[in-house]
Image: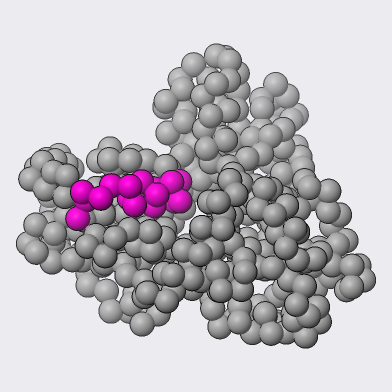
Amino acid sequence: MSFLEKIATLDRLPEHYQNMSIEEKKERIRQIKQQLGNRLFITGHHYQRDEVIEFADATGDSLQLAQLSKANREAEYIVFCGVHFMAETADMLTEDHQHVILPDLKAGCSMADMADIDQTEHAWIELQKVYGDTILPLTYVNSTAAIKAFCGRNGGATVTSSNAKAMVQWAFTQKQRLLFLPDQHLGRNTAYELGIPLKEMAIWDPIARELICEGPIEDVKVILWKGHCSVHEKFTVAQIDQLRNTSPKTNIIVHPECTFDVVQAADLNGSTHYIIETIKNAPAGTSWAVGTEMNLVNRLAQQFPDKDVFSLNSTMCPCLTMNRIDLDHLLWSLEEIVEGRLHYPITVDKQTTDEGNLALKRMLERV
């Protein structure tokens, strides 16, 4: 059953959760955590609501949390507070006796959904007609298990925003060209930083089913999948220009999922971990405009009150799908565990797991 088909069968949140006070929900979550003890492990992605992060046993980025889940052999139930592809990765890495649960199955990722396996298989056939066996596939970890498996069985690997440069460099030791899925912006920004000119990059449009390039087709080294993060595309050069005029001493730091023009115009760019550590270690009194998800930006502002931290986009909203997981859905998942039911378990079949883990292994061996 596909992700969209699963969504169509979802149960509605029981009404009584909406009638409970916030403190009642929090107290019940605390009770269940104490009751289940080491059998329960709650992970919280950096972009989650504060009310969810409060109960997380570990916080971090998607791969980090999946790896922590793998390391926690005692946990029978891993409640993954993130989005669907993240829970898939956790299921791929953990043992068979461990159950990965997503509190709300509607917590998906628009970027991951922009590259499905049928589109990718078709693109691979068409691109090989043009370039032959000269392409290596790389996928951002923000992708479905099926796309990770595709890369695994075709000699490729996964990348994170922290290690994308190292993995792109490795890819070019294997083949003349690479196909970068599903985020065109991370792929473009990384390749450009490594000295590859824009004219040697092309875009594969999975809807139009065509390759779009500005220069000669034979000169293309990097084929970028036409996908993007809907949150990070909302940062613009106009916002940076306005800030330069009104607050010239403010440092602008953005995630490499932002567009090429925004990354070029910013002072700094890097992974979520890089952004957190940069602001953490910055001198007191400095000002920081941050181009990434709003929940994290607000949390950084609270954690480092000695600095002025705010969103580059003053009208920014939190990621809608990340924000679907709230106290109600977290509590619902936990109470279902207590009642002996697994609510929205995330399971990846063995072949997909084996091939996807191969792509992850190739990355982890090199970074």
Q: Residue at x 63, y 40 (%)?
A: 270
Q: Residue at x 28, y 42 (%)?
A: 56
Please indicate, yes or no, whether residue 314 appears anywhere in the rendered image. Answer: no
353 over 190 or under it: above or below: below
User: For the N terminus, which image quadrant?
Assistant: bottom left
Please indicate, yes or no, whether residue 289 appears anywhere in the rendered image. Answer: yes
Q: Is residue 48 magenta?
A: no
Q: Quadrant of residue 184?
A: bottom right
Q: Residue furthest top?
A: 284
Q: Give the x, y percent position of residue 364.
A: 53, 51
Q: Quadrant of residue 359?
A: bottom right
Q: Is residue 341 left or right of residue 313?
A: left
Q: Nearer the viewer, residue 154 or 237?
A: 154
Q: Residue at x 13, y 53 (%)?
A: 19
Q: Give the x, y percent position of residue 157.
A: 59, 62
User: For the C terminus, which image quadrant?
Assistant: top right
145 over 231 or under it: above or below: below
Q: Residue furthest right?
A: 216
Q: Is residue 126 left or right of residue 272?
A: right
Q: Nearer the viewer, residue 169 or 65?
A: 169
Q: Is residue 269 left or right of residue 23?
A: right
Q: Quadrant of residue 250?
A: top right
Q: Which span of residues is magenta-colored?
A: 61-76
Q: Give the x, y percent position of residue 148.
A: 52, 67
Model colouring: one colour
Q: Nearer the viewer, residue 294 or 163?
A: 163
Count the labels in the image: 0
Q: Is residue 73 magenta?
A: yes
Q: Residue at x 34, y 52 (%)?
A: 70
Q: Give the x, y percent position of residue 91.
A: 34, 62
Q: Main secondary structure of the magenta part?
A: helix
